[in-house]
Amino acid sequence: MYVLVEQGGLTSVDVGSWDTSNVTTMSRMFSGASGLTSVDVRSWDTSKVTDMSWMFYGASGLTSVDVGSWDTSNVTTMSRMFSDARGLTSVDVGSWDISNVITMTSMFYGASGLTSVDVRSWDTSKVTSMTYMFVDATSLDSLKLGVKFRFKDSTGLMEKNAVPYTGKWKNAQDETVSYGSTAGFVKGYDGSKPGTYVREKIK
């Protein structure tokens, strides 16, 4: 579905009542729709969709998108799904079933407005690539992680060592659990201490 690709002047679109029950690809659907400030997709049936790559790429006018109830159980690729969606401050993907996803390459690349991402229900056992997943997600200071989540390869999650940051990540529920650096966090998180991990700041 390349219906709205590169429609930079578009500010709104009525797609809430669309029947998407037989759609298998939503790749690039809102790609480049930089003027879009809202889109109602919360009731879409995505149960047959396998490809969500580049879906909101460059949709920099969106501050939020309600995709929390989507059925993603058949999706295999989410590459660049929210890449360069710089206006997004949050995205509700915490309850998604991503157990069949293989690639998440650059999924949040350049999503510089995101302050937190909830992936606590994610089972990443089939994921082979998270390359550049968080590159230039410069505001990302909080990650909610679950028991079946593992970082894969070079995610690009940035180090923050300058004041007010210490460079460490801490479990907000148990501050005895911490990692001395972002690299250590990405390498060391094994699912045994799930919870909300936040960047430590100088008190």
Image (tube, rainbow, N blue to C red):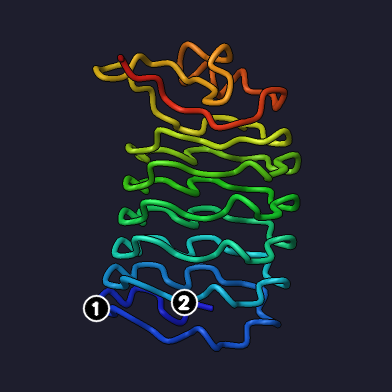
Q: Secondary structure at mark 1?
A: loop
Q: Secondary structure at mark 2?
A: loop
**Which residue is denoted by mark 2 in the rendering?**
40
Q: Quadrant of the C terminus?
A: top left
Q: Position of residue 166 (x, y in %)?
A: 35, 14
User: Compared to 176, does 5 lie above or below?
Assistant: below
Quadrant in the picture for residue 159: top left
Disc 1 versus disc 2: nearer the observer: 2
**Which residue is denoted by mark 1 in the rendering?**
9
Q: Residue at x 69, y 52 (%)?
A: 98
Q: Nearer the viewer, residue 203 or 31?
A: 203
User: Compared to 117, does 175 lie above or below?
Assistant: above
Q: Position of residue 113 (x, y in %)?
A: 32, 47
Q: Nearer the viewer, residue 103 or 36?
A: 36
Badge 1 crowding class, 10 Å Cα cut-off, few under 14, some 14 to 19, many 20 or more, is few
Q: Amino acid at mark 1?
A: Gly
Q: Residue at x 40, y 33 (%)?
A: 141
Q: Quadrant of the N terminus?
A: bottom right
